[in-house]
Amino acid sequence: MRKKYIVRLTEEERQKCQEVIRKLKARSRKVRRAQILLKADANGPAWTD
């Protein structure tokens, strides 16, 4: 199965997601989305396909 979307975050976007996760005062949906984006990032410690 081919990849439907490839997520590539810039260093700035990656840092912003990490900041949202660290603060934990953000709404939980926002934190979950930041975690998913970081895991889906092709240049980061991504999930396997």
Image (cartoon, rainbow, N blue to C red):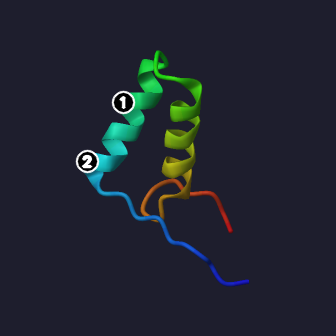
Left/right of residue 33 with respect to residue 43 in the rendered view:
right
Residue 25, placed above or below residue 37:
above
Residue 24, placed above or below residue 16:
above
Q: Which mark is residue 12?
A: 2
Q: Which residue is mark 1?
A: 19
The residue type indicated by label 2 comes to Glu
The quarter of the picture where the C terminus appears is bottom right
Q: CA distance from mark 1 to mark 2?
A: 10 Å
Q: Residue furthest left?
A: 12
The quarter of the picture where the N terminus appears is bottom right
Q: Earlier in the sequence, mark 1 or mark 2?
A: 2
Residue at x 58% of width, y 32% of height? 29
* Secondary structure of the residue carrying numbered label 2: helix
Residue 28 locus on image (x, y percent): 58, 26
Left/right of residue 2 with respect to residue 5 in the rendered view:
right
* Secondary structure of the residue carrying numbered label 1: helix
Q: Residue furthest bottom?
A: 2
The residue type indicated by label 1 comes to Glu
Residue 42 locus on image (x, y percent): 48, 65
Residue at x 43% of width, y 24% of height? 22
